[in-house]
Image (cartoon, rainbow, N blue to C red):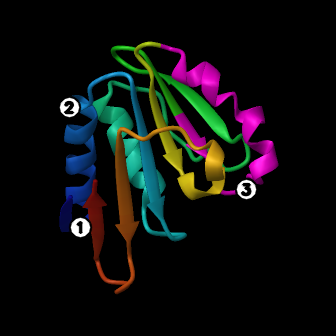
Amino acid sequence: MDERRVAEDEMARWGEAFGRSLARPAVIAVSGELGAGKTTLVRAICRGLGVVEPVTSPTFALVHRYAGAAGPVFHVDAYRLKPRDVPDLALDDMLAEPEAVVLIEWPERLGAAAPAFSRSLLLSDSDRGARRRLVVS
Protein backbone atom coordinates (compact mmCIF):
# COMPACT_ATOMS: atom_id res chain seq x y z
CA MET A 1 0.00 0.00 0.00
CA ASP A 2 1.23 3.47 -0.91
CA GLU A 3 -0.21 6.58 0.70
CA ARG A 4 0.59 10.18 -0.17
CA ARG A 5 -0.83 13.71 -0.02
CA VAL A 6 -1.01 15.40 -3.40
CA ALA A 7 -2.06 18.75 -4.79
CA GLU A 8 -4.19 18.65 -7.95
CA ASP A 9 -1.23 19.18 -10.28
CA GLU A 10 0.74 16.44 -8.50
CA MET A 11 -2.26 14.12 -8.73
CA ALA A 12 -2.44 14.80 -12.48
CA ARG A 13 1.25 13.98 -12.96
CA TRP A 14 0.93 10.87 -10.81
CA GLY A 15 -2.18 9.75 -12.72
CA GLU A 16 -0.48 10.15 -16.11
CA ALA A 17 2.55 8.17 -14.93
CA PHE A 18 0.25 5.52 -13.45
CA GLY A 19 -1.61 5.23 -16.76
CA ARG A 20 1.63 4.86 -18.73
CA SER A 21 2.80 2.11 -16.36
CA LEU A 22 -0.34 -0.03 -16.43
CA ALA A 23 -0.02 -3.58 -17.71
CA ARG A 24 -3.05 -4.53 -19.79
CA PRO A 25 -5.66 -5.75 -19.23
CA ALA A 26 -6.38 -3.85 -16.02
CA VAL A 27 -9.40 -3.08 -13.88
CA ILE A 28 -8.89 -0.11 -11.57
CA ALA A 29 -11.21 0.84 -8.70
CA VAL A 30 -11.34 4.59 -8.04
CA SER A 31 -13.05 5.35 -4.73
CA GLY A 32 -13.67 8.48 -2.71
CA GLU A 33 -16.40 10.79 -1.53
CA LEU A 34 -18.16 13.30 -3.76
CA GLY A 35 -15.78 16.05 -4.82
CA ALA A 36 -12.61 14.14 -3.88
CA GLY A 37 -11.25 14.29 -7.44
CA LYS A 38 -12.05 10.84 -8.84
CA THR A 39 -12.89 12.07 -12.35
CA THR A 40 -9.88 14.40 -12.32
CA LEU A 41 -7.67 11.43 -11.51
CA VAL A 42 -9.35 9.25 -14.17
CA ARG A 43 -8.80 12.04 -16.72
CA ALA A 44 -5.06 12.04 -15.91
CA ILE A 45 -4.83 8.24 -16.09
CA CYS A 46 -6.53 8.35 -19.48
CA ARG A 47 -3.95 10.88 -20.74
CA GLY A 48 -1.24 8.46 -19.62
CA LEU A 49 -3.01 5.72 -21.57
CA GLY A 50 -2.91 7.84 -24.73
CA VAL A 51 -6.53 9.02 -24.78
CA VAL A 52 -6.62 12.30 -26.72
CA GLU A 53 -10.35 13.02 -26.73
CA PRO A 54 -12.00 14.89 -23.82
CA VAL A 55 -12.63 12.64 -20.82
CA THR A 56 -15.88 13.51 -19.08
CA SER A 57 -17.82 12.03 -16.21
CA PRO A 58 -20.16 9.23 -17.33
CA THR A 59 -22.53 9.84 -14.39
CA PHE A 60 -25.63 9.69 -16.57
CA ALA A 61 -24.30 7.58 -19.45
CA LEU A 62 -22.73 5.15 -16.91
CA VAL A 63 -19.93 4.12 -19.33
CA HIS A 64 -17.69 6.00 -21.74
CA ARG A 65 -15.37 4.18 -24.13
CA TYR A 66 -12.19 5.89 -25.30
CA ALA A 67 -9.50 4.92 -27.75
CA GLY A 68 -6.22 4.56 -25.90
CA ALA A 69 -2.81 4.20 -27.52
CA ALA A 70 -2.72 0.43 -26.96
CA GLY A 71 -6.40 -0.48 -26.67
CA PRO A 72 -9.77 0.59 -25.36
CA VAL A 73 -10.23 2.48 -22.13
CA PHE A 74 -13.59 2.20 -20.37
CA HIS A 75 -14.64 4.77 -17.78
CA VAL A 76 -17.49 3.51 -15.60
CA ASP A 77 -19.36 5.63 -13.06
CA ALA A 78 -21.43 3.34 -10.84
CA TYR A 79 -22.72 6.11 -8.54
CA ARG A 80 -26.32 5.88 -9.76
CA LEU A 81 -26.40 2.08 -10.06
CA LYS A 82 -28.48 -0.31 -8.07
CA PRO A 83 -27.00 -3.83 -7.76
CA ARG A 84 -29.79 -5.21 -9.96
CA ASP A 85 -28.66 -2.85 -12.75
CA VAL A 86 -25.03 -4.04 -12.83
CA PRO A 87 -25.61 -6.63 -15.61
CA ASP A 88 -26.74 -3.76 -17.87
CA LEU A 89 -23.20 -2.33 -17.75
CA ALA A 90 -21.88 -5.28 -19.80
CA LEU A 91 -18.74 -5.49 -17.68
CA ASP A 92 -18.10 -8.97 -19.08
CA ASP A 93 -17.84 -7.51 -22.58
CA MET A 94 -15.36 -4.86 -21.39
CA LEU A 95 -13.29 -7.45 -19.53
CA ALA A 96 -13.25 -9.73 -22.60
CA GLU A 97 -11.24 -7.17 -24.56
CA PRO A 98 -7.62 -8.36 -24.16
CA GLU A 99 -5.97 -4.91 -24.06
CA ALA A 100 -8.72 -3.06 -22.17
CA VAL A 101 -8.32 -0.82 -19.17
CA VAL A 102 -11.50 -0.42 -17.13
CA LEU A 103 -11.58 2.48 -14.67
CA ILE A 104 -14.50 2.22 -12.24
CA GLU A 105 -15.61 5.13 -10.09
CA TRP A 106 -17.77 4.18 -7.10
CA PRO A 107 -16.82 0.47 -7.34
CA GLU A 108 -18.53 -0.30 -4.03
CA ARG A 109 -21.88 0.25 -5.79
CA LEU A 110 -21.26 -2.90 -7.86
CA GLY A 111 -21.56 -5.10 -4.78
CA ALA A 112 -20.89 -8.79 -5.32
CA ALA A 113 -20.85 -8.23 -9.10
CA ALA A 114 -17.63 -6.21 -8.88
CA PRO A 115 -14.80 -7.70 -10.94
CA ALA A 116 -11.40 -8.47 -9.48
CA PHE A 117 -9.43 -5.23 -9.36
CA SER A 118 -5.83 -4.95 -10.53
CA ARG A 119 -5.36 -1.88 -8.34
CA SER A 120 -7.50 0.21 -6.02
CA LEU A 121 -7.16 3.97 -5.70
CA LEU A 122 -8.77 5.85 -2.81
CA LEU A 123 -9.02 9.63 -2.77
CA SER A 124 -9.95 11.61 0.30
CA ASP A 125 -10.45 15.32 0.80
CA SER A 126 -11.41 14.98 4.44
CA ASP A 127 -9.36 17.97 5.61
CA ARG A 128 -10.80 20.14 2.80
CA GLY A 129 -7.35 21.48 2.09
CA ALA A 130 -5.51 21.99 -1.16
CA ARG A 131 -4.02 18.51 -0.93
CA ARG A 132 -5.82 15.21 -1.36
CA ARG A 133 -4.96 11.93 0.32
CA LEU A 134 -4.27 9.25 -2.31
CA VAL A 135 -4.03 5.62 -1.23
CA VAL A 136 -2.92 3.05 -3.80
CA SER A 137 -3.31 -0.66 -3.14
Q: In what element is the residue under mark 1?
A: strand
Check if residue 79 falls in the magenta segment.
yes
Residue neighbourhood size for the residue with mark 3, other residues' Cα within 10 Å, grouped as few (<14), some (14–19), many (≥20): few
Q: CA distance from mark 1 to mark 2?
A: 21 Å
Pointer 2 or 3: first along the chain? 2
Residue neighbourhood size for the residue with mark 1, other residues' Cα within 10 Å, grouped as few (<14), some (14–19), many (≥20): few
Q: In what element is the residue under mark 2?
A: helix
Pointer 1 or 3: first along the chain? 1
Q: Does 90 sit above or below residue 111?
A: above
Q: CA distance from mark 2 to mark 3?
A: 30 Å
Check if residue 7 falls in the magenta segment.
no
Q: Is residue 106 visible?
A: no
Residue with the mark numbered 1:
7
Q: Residue visible at 20% across and 48% down?
A: 13
Which amino acid lies under the numbered mark 3 shown in the image of this protein?
Answer: Arg
Task: Pinpoint residue 67: horizontal percent, then vertical percent.
Answer: 47, 19
Q: For residue 21, which numbered disc appears in the image?
A: 2
Task: Pinpoint residue 136: horizontal percent, then vertical percent.
Answer: 27, 55
Residue situated in front as seen by the camera: 104 or 117: 117
**Mark in the foreground, 1 or 2:** 2
Q: For residue 80, which numbered disc appears in the image?
A: 3
Task: Pinpoint residue 26: horizontal percent, then vertical percent.
Answer: 38, 30
Quick check: 1 left or right of 55?
left
Residue situated in front as seen by the camera: 44 or 110: 110
- Marks 1/3 in contact by CB < 8 Å: the verdict is no
Q: Does 113 sit above or below residue 67?
A: below
Q: Residue visible at 44% across and 48% down?
A: 29
Task: Read off the magenta span.
Answer: 75-97
Q: In what element is the residue under mark 3?
A: loop
Which amino acid lies under the numbered mark 2 shown in the image of this protein?
Answer: Ser
- Extreme residue in the right direction: 84
